Amino acid sequence: MFDLVVYCGFAFLALSCYTLGRYFHDRRQLRRFPSFSVSGITPLWLMYHSWRGKRFAAVDKAHEALGPVVRIAPNHVSFSDPSAYKDIYGHGSPILKDDFYAHIAAGNPSMAQTTSKADHARKRKNLAHIFSAKEITAMEPRVMGIVQKLCRDIKIKSEGRMIAPTDFHQVKDGSFDLRPWLNMFSYDAITAMFWSNTYAFLDKGNDICPSYDSSGADQAKPDLFSNLPYRPTEKRPVPMPVHEIVAECTTMMDAGNDTTQTSLTNCMYQLAANPAKQTKLRNQLLATLPEKEHQPIAHYAELQKAPYLRACLDESFRCKPPVAFGLPRRTVGNGAMIAGHFIPADVTVSCPLYSLHRNPSLFEDPLAFLPERWLPDDEDYAPSDEERQNLKILLSAVQPRREGMYWPQSGVHGTEYCDCGAGGGV
């Protein structure tokens, strides 16, 4: 027993000496940046807040206390300077995705997870046509059918009734949690678009999923999955290997569902917390979509006539981005200049949207939910010329890039396909 205590003591001492030695040796010269608590010495600070699910808030607090550049781990520097966003994630940036993505991929990276630009370009060729405007528009009737089910379920729950005997989500005092239903909607919509055969969570009232379908029936309907080059064709003589198809399908289910459900939940929360904005949106929708066939579910082409809807979605993304923490990237080669600071190679860098969107130098009253700030001529709010320019920059930072990633956009279809290369995007 005594020997075990001695060994543990020596191991702890050796680890402490190594950690402190690495900190003071500082071969990448990162000690010039302030660190919060013990974040410059050990990654445990960042790991702890990630485990709590409050990483974005902890990093934001660090930026508030220490400034626009903070060392949040021994080899990780976070930037809240607006110019850093373009330097890190912008089109043509030499900075690549961090090893964080390789750990998620577990040896089988999808296009969203690969850190190789050459591998990314190859994967992009196989997938870009799937997300063309023609293919996405063809899926709209399926999405509208799932939206119809969501509206049906919300009405049933608001009346205190159960969707089915398998519905275990209770209604208490006339209230129920909307989030699980938006989560079920996201899964059903994505599976309807990609694989025709949905999970039917909204019909069951729960998200319990069997591991297989006993029928094994071929749906024989064109969906997005059927467009994957899983067999040789004249245009694509080399088909995708099975393991790559599995990787892409996994990413579509994971990233697509999570960001869509989170975005919908956040937007519903903002409207519920701001009843005046909710009433304004409802009145505009009723005025814009007067015909019965467009209520309560309208086509995307009709919804484009309601600019306040788009403004609510954009403002919800600004106030509560679905991915709030800074997506990690890694400098390579000879390093990179980020917001005027030289960062040597092999350093993890990030720019958290949560902090960027709450920057009072960019947006007036940044904590307020003000969809009007996105509208050019609204009688209820007149943003300054500087804020208008910042809003344009915020949109242009993500919308024009279409080279290979999923980015939650402010369209009615939820998450649009945005190809941002091996360095950009998610």
Image (spheres, rainbow, N blue to C red):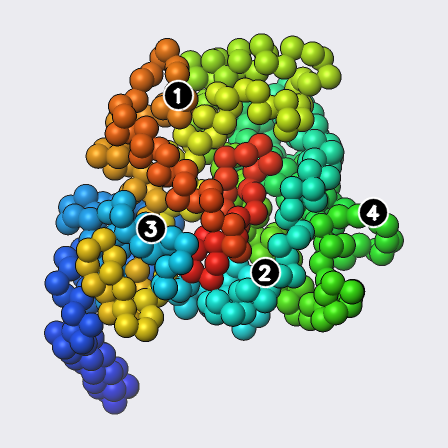
Question: Disc 1 to disc 4, how far (Cα)?
Answer: 43 Å
| Amino acid type, callout 1 | Pro
Q: Earlier in the sequence, mark 3 or mark 1?
A: 3
Q: Which residue is mark 1?
A: 376
Residues tagged 3 and 1 counted as in contact (Cβ below 8 A): no
Question: Disc 2 to disc 3, how far (Cα)?
Answer: 22 Å
Question: Disc 1 to disc 2, how far (Cα)?
Answer: 36 Å
| Amino acid type, callout 3 | Lys
Nearest the camera: 34 or 9?
Answer: 34
| Amino acid type, callout 2 | Arg
Question: Disc 2 to disc 4, how far (Cα)?
Answer: 24 Å
Q: Which residue is mark 3?
A: 86
Could you tell whether 190 is left or right of 82 in the image? right
The secondary structure type at the circle numbered 1 is loop
Q: Which residue is mark 2?
A: 124
| Label number found at residue 91 | none
Nearest the camera: 400 or 166?
Answer: 400
What crowding class fits label 1: few (fewer than 14 Cα within 10 Å), some (14-19), or many (20 or more)? few
Q: Is residue 202 visible?
A: no
Q: Earlier in the sequence, mark 1 or mark 4?
A: 4
Q: Earlier in the sequence, mark 2 or mark 3?
A: 3
